[in-house]
Image: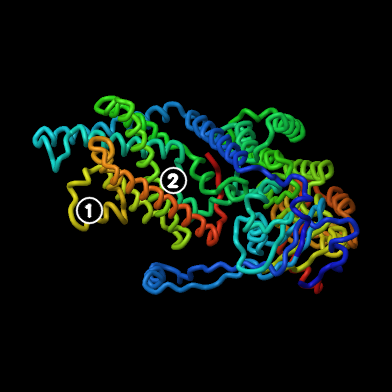
Amino acid sequence: MSTEDNEQAGGLRSVSRTGRLRGTLAFLITCWKVNLASAMEYRASFFMMAGMMFINNFMWLFFWSLFFGKFQVVNGWEMGDVMMMWAVGAGGFGWANMLFGNFNRIAPIVAAGQLDVYLSQPKPVLLHVLASRMSLTAAGDFFFGLVVYAWVGNHSLAGLLQFLLGLLLSGLLFMGITILAGCLAFFIGNAEGLAQQVFNSFVALSTYPSDIFKGLARTLLFTLLPAGFISFLPIGLLRDFDPAFVWKAVAATLAFGALAVLAFRLGLKRYASGNAITLRG
Amino acid sequence: MLYREEAPKYAKGAGQVVALQTQALRKVFTVKRKDAGLAGSFRSLLKPSWEEKVAVRSIDLTVQRGEMVAFLGPNGAGKSTTIKMLTGILHPSSGEAKVLGCTPWREREKLAFRIGAVFGQKSQLWYHLPPIDTFDLISRIYELDRADYHARRDDLIERFELGPYLHTPVRKLSLGERMRCEIAVSFLHRPQLLFLDEPTIGLDVVVKQRIRELIREVNRDEGTTVFLTSHDAGDMEELCSRAVVIHHGGILLDAPVDRLKREVLNRKIISLTLAAGYDASMLPPLPGTEVIAGEGRRLKLGVDLAVTDIEAVLGTVIGTYRLDDVTVEDPPMEEIIAHIYGTGG
């Protein structure tokens, strides 16, 4: 079977890898600008949602401060470590959800057949889907992370770089695990509830000091549901820099990220679309 | 397939370039089967049963560059599934397809730079933002040169008369205005082949007409190949030179629209709202015309265009009754399909 040759078609793009990367970056920046503009269409909602999340996170820190008022040290963790755990967790979740706000909506998007528009456009589908939404509440999470770091963090250059690395790993891990769970929708249909459970468990586990878990629970925390790689960052990366832990955290982040991309690609072959009416933004 | 024009008319050759070609393209979905009611739900939970649903049985099709092809069929015929396979959205169960030299599901991204797609029920416009912002985003998605983008955007805005609502959030546009924006946006990167899936669905007659004119204009000026699915025979009549009718996932008919009009679409439906109640005894005999329904102030007539014409029938009706409203429509696609079956093609 033959149709006109690609080369004859006039318009086939022979763009270099650098050109393609530059094009993708320009697309991402425009996407984020459009998301932000869309979010700011409702100014009151924007500020209220971000503000409420900021306050909500501080409420948790308040409860932890009550706890540490009674017990100064728990399994080697002090109040400052718990605060940095929240800073890294909420901050990482915040940037991921601001820039790639669809990462915890993959399951409903797939199940409702809402990938069609993304698939019909010439950009990597997963990246396009992820960047097509900005979470309003996430701005509060991210800002909360920065404020806590400014409050109790290490303000040396090394301390700042370690904190930024922590934010990066935390955000990427949140995305990897949640996308992987969301991709179940390609294989089992409506996986929205299951994906949401995985997401909630992961968020909850990342907000408790990993050293309070022992035995099987701790093993699971660093394998199947690797929230430990986020919750241990305040110790292994920020307080007592442990290269072995950091390398393992980087490897786990890359592995779960790669698994998520692979699952999404395999899933696209099974994608069944749908007839639901779809609107963007 | 019951009827098809001779293949050489559409085959590659005589200076023609094939834009799209499929061979035995097939798509089967596996769907869960559930009996009705709560008991059925429990049975399905404990012992689920699955069945295969053939959405597209086998499609063999060739479309030349610059052609305007209508891909018609009733709901569930397989139109949208076919278009989704041709745009790389769905992977087929079996068969082959080449679109502008690419296999859509294997070279999706490369192909997407050169085709456009408008899905009547799936918007690519940002709902809370004005269309001008979507234009900007789409220009980045297709990596358009900035100067070229601005010139092209301004041309489309003028041509599609989008100026008055370019800065109005999409959520506040009417369906017709939104569809006009959707189609204009899909032309931004100068696609060589445009897939339109039900572009006139839900639109009123005037807006439908305008959208058809705009599509025709771009096809004429830029040589864009148009592959249009619709369950509205009017889209085919007014836009396309060739019609492919599918039913139950297979091609039922592939013929020039002129021939189809002559042999199949030779019937119109006139719906009238009378000023007073319908009185059958007042209506004189009208050759080639049947009363489909007459009740209260509503009167519906079927007109055989091979015997008479709309003007003659309307002239008689206007001379007999006082009218409040008149609509002339094509028969529904189901009736056209039944007619094709009835005549053996």
Q: Is residue A243 left or right of residue A115?
A: left
Q: Which residue is mark 1?
A: A218
Regarding mark 1 in the picture, which secondary structure is present there? helix
Q: Residue at x 66, y 61 (%)?
A: B82
Residue B24, picture quadrant: bottom right
**Quarter of the rendering containing residue A143:** top left
Which of the two discs, 2 and 1, labels the residue nearer the N terminus?
Answer: 2
Q: Nearer the viewer, residue B315 or A250?
A: A250
What's the chain of the residue with tag 2? A
Q: Is residue A270 above or below residue A61?
A: below
Q: Quarter-wise, where is residue B250 in the image?
A: bottom right
Q: Nearer the viewer, residue B216 or B109?
A: B109
Q: Is residue A247 above or below residue A65?
A: below
Residue drawn at x 20%, y 32% is A80
Instruction: Please give the chain letter of the residue carrying mark 1.
Output: A
Q: Is residue A59 left or right of residue A166?
A: left
User: How many other residues sit within 10 Å of disc 2, few (<14), some (14-19) or many (≥20)?
Assistant: many
Name the mark on residue A103: 2
